[in-house]
Amino acid sequence: MRLYTVLIFLFFRSFAATAQQNADFVKANYDKMEVMIPMRDGVKLFTSIYLPKDQSVKYPVMLKRTPYSCSPYGIDQFTGGFQNIALAKSGYIWITQDVRGKYMSEGVFVDVRPFNPNKKNIQDVDEASDTYDTAEWLIRNLPNFNGRIGVYGISYPGFYATMAILADHPAIKAVSPQAPVTDWFIGDDFHHNGAFFQMDAFSFFSGFGKPRPEPTTEGAPGFSDWNSTDNYTFYLQTGALPNFNTKHLHEGIPFWNELMEHPNYDAWWQARNPRPHLKNVRPAVMTVGGLFDAEDCFGAWNVYKAIEQQNGTIVQNRIVEGPWCHGCWARTDGNKLGNVDFGENTSNYYQQELEFKFFEYYLKDQGTMDLADARIFATGSNHWTFYDQWPPKSATPKKYFFQENGGLNTILPSGKGFDEYRSDPAHPVPYTEDVHLRRTREYMTDDQRFASRRPDVLVYDSGVLQGSRDRYRACDC
């Protein structure tokens, strides 16, 4: 345990040192502005702008719109958190904006605010129109701006990146939604195939969901009165879902109440799905996701899919999927997750060979655009594969069927049969063998065989799958 603690300490000390080095670089090479940008309905959005001190050339913009704050606030406070420091060193105007109703921006915040394709007057606003109005202001007011805007964001900011595609502003040339919140009912964050992901929803909205009546630089704290070090015990003792509102949230989280009021995929949820609107896409798009993303794995695959299916070949549309947890291509070296080692610094590869090239080409005309439409990391064989589309043309889907005696095979069994188990809600199956309070990211690669020892878990095994490594290798180009 002592060695483990020392390793964690050394990791965070190294991370902090790198962040400080980046902050020192930014302070030495950038000037900072803070402005309130007016939207069409009069609401003003707080925006931090980092301008390169070298004014001998014109620069493109890298824009991130976020509900998680523009911190640090103050023109003498500099961030070390530019997502890709190589891009920062190459020369960009970096802009971060508090979205409507969050932190220092005016207005009222709406979670996953629906896109309105039929705006009739200046009061009809959404995140796409706020992005459009921001782009207009930048064109008219930014010094040494080359007229091109790139938009990026991870997780919830990834949702706002998708909204930037729908803004349809001619200056927005390249967009990278990364682990984008896309459909909170079908597959992202709080529902997995419609099943409510209670632990994540409660932990997140207990703080994020608190009303913000006035602009502020401080975020609201989340729930902390756990009285336990074991989340299995905490959730079991709290009991039925309504108890979380009465006991712990005290009816004070509006969006939690809306979640409870809309348990099915009704019109309210469907309005919050941007995928049907991703048509006539003009900017180049590179959607990024993690193969072991417990939060927003669905969004990355399906934003790419929606653009691909609704635009044909008229748009430059790409997807990158690496062996990452949520946003870990920007927060870790991507070398391993839990006990699984991927054999290389996959995050550095992504930042240098993919993200850097994407924005340099579309925002500066630098380099050549030789990125494959789909770049997917093959776990197990641990190498990057390249495809001209996803799913690959050569992919052949196969169905597997449950067999007698716990078997799994592509052969449809003859006759009829069944297996059964008895489930006891008072003794639910845990998702991990470990005891901890917070849901871990590592559980996505944890060994789950512990659950097979329980009488209420059915296990089916196939034979050894032959030739997988050779098939992956054959896809290299």
Image (cartoon, grey):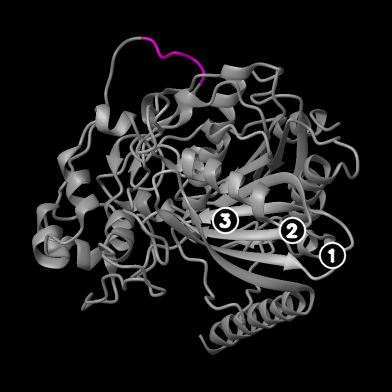
Going by the numbered disc 3, the residue's amino acid type is: Gly
Label 2 crowd bin: few (<14), some (14–19), many (20+), radius 10 Å: few
Q: Residue at x 60, y 44 (%)?
A: 136
Q: In front: mark 3 or mark 1?
A: 1
Label 1 crowd bin: few (<14), some (14–19), many (20+), radius 10 Å: few
Q: Do labels 2 and 1 touch, CB within 8 Å? A: yes
Q: Residue at x 64, y 77 (%)?
A: 78
Any mark on residue 395, and which? Answer: none
Going by the numbered disc 1, the residue's amino acid type is: Gln
Q: Which residue is mark 3?
A: 327
Q: Which residue is mark 2?
A: 143
Q: Which residue is mark 1?
A: 55
What are the residue bounds of the magenta stretch?
A: 410-414
Say what secondary structure mark 1 lies in.
loop
Q: In front: mark 2 or mark 3?
A: 2
Residue 208 vs 471, above or below: the answer is: below
**Residue 437 visible in the displayed image:** yes
- The answer to which of 319 and 457 lies nearer the viewer is 319
Say what secondary structure mark 2 lies in.
loop
Residue 426 is drawn in which quadrant?
bottom left
Going by the numbered disc 2, the residue's amino acid type is: Pro
Residue 191 highlighted magenta (yes or no):
no
Residue 411 highlighted magenta (yes or no):
yes
Residue 145 vs 407, above or below: the answer is: below
Mark 2 vs 3, N-terminal side: 2
Image spot of residue 51 (x, y percent)? 72, 65
